[in-house]
Amino acid sequence: MKRIMLYFSIGILFGITMIKSEAASWFRIYEMFQFKSFHMYGIIGAAVALGVIITQSIKRFKLRSFFGEEIQIPSKTKLVKAPLFGGVIFGLGWALTGACPGPIYVLIGAGYFPLFVVLASALLGTYCYGVLRPKLPH
Amino acid sequence: MKKQTCIARKFQHQFNLILIQLVFIYLGKIFFIMNFITEPWPWYIGGPAIAVVLFLLLFSEKQFGMSSNLRTLCAMAGAGKKTAFFNFEWRQYRWNLVVAIGAAVGGFIATSYMSDGSVGEIHQDTVLQLDTMGVHGAGKNFMPETFFGADALSNPKTLALLALGGFLVGFGTRYAGGCTSGHAISGLSNLQLQSLIAVIGFFIGGLLMNHFLLPYLL
């Protein structure tokens, strides 16, 4: 129960950040792809710069979690085609709807209910990928 | 000897006090001058806040990646019976659904209680360009009313565009193995080549849509 509250709180912090930093804003995403503002690049850049420090410290110093276990960071498999092709497909959808999978939930909570359509079709998209997976290059 | 250590300690003490004062002045600046609660956050607050989310999840023995929830939801709905990709123990990923529910609650809190209705400035060129394309409200509203307003879904074209975009997001993230959180934040932080390839892919797709397709679709 305690852990569930922890994950719930982390989610709340994430949701607040997506709205207050405007990373979930369609206009901001559009502006980013037009290279007219540093804002989105600043957000991603700062998050990744600090993220590298956090992640590499965990690996180097074998840091322990809040629950006392050694933190395991799984490395993903070394694929080239799947992240490239999948990335391009996601990028097309990202620039069209302005919604990454995280902000979809945030924006629904914020009262932008047309995002339910995006969520439903994203579920359908994921399902279709699961069905077609054996036939796709990876 | 004793007198010397005493003086050294006194200096140390004063140094600590100055340091604490500096920290408080800095925090004071952030909280009061920027009107932190109600105004939009600049990138140097938003970016570190995302890093805090990553930190908290890693130290809770979890990973930061939101798109895998879509797979979990498919598995929950019973897609595993027919398709091997969804045949996994989805119960172990329930924590991530809790994060997603929290994210929705956070979105509600931020919009309802932490906003004075102001939004950050959008570049003038972008505002004008969007106006000529029929998308109004940049720099005034958080989201364009044409797509996300209350009546947006009564327009079949908008409905079709949102459905198409959502499908691409769902298909693409799972194919790529992650989205902006899983690849761009977690993956790049872990210095994974695969995530760099994915992020380059995100931008190829995004730029294609933004510059060449969107002007015809809107």
Image (tube, rainbow, N blue to C red):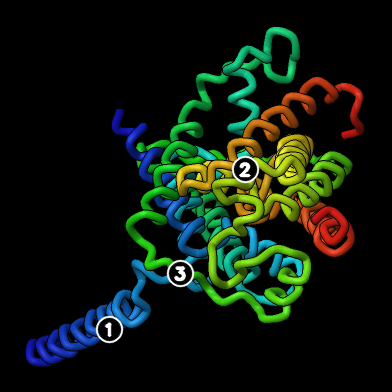
B146 w.r.t. B26: above or below:
above
Please tell me whether residue A55 is drawn above or below residue B118 in the rendered image.
Answer: above
| Nearer the observer, A42 or A100 | A100
Q: Where is residue B77 in the image (x, y as percent from the top left)?
A: 60, 16
Work out how far the residue at label 1 is from the one at label 2, CA to CA, in angstroms: 38 Å
Q: Is residue B192 above or below residue A134?
A: below
Residues at circles 3 and 2 in contact by the CB criterion of under 8 Å = no
Q: Is mark 1 on a helix, strand or loop?
A: helix
Identify the residue under disc 2.
A101
A11, B212: nearer the viewer = B212
- For image coordinates 31% across by 74% down, the residue present is B31
In the rendered image, which residue does mark 3 sit on?
Answer: B40
Would you say B130 lies left or right of B56 here? Answer: right
If you read the primary sequence from the N terminus, does the residue marked by circle 3 or circle 1 appear first? 1
Tell us which disc is closer to us: 1 or 2.
Answer: 2
Q: Position of residue B42 (x, y in %)?
A: 49, 73
Q: Quadrant of the N terminus of chain B?
A: bottom left
Q: How far apart are marks 3 and 1 (CA)?
A: 21 Å
Output the chain of dot 2. A
User: Rounded to the nearest whole Å, what is the CA distance between mark 3 and mark 2?
Assistant: 22 Å
Q: Name the residue under label 1.
A: B25
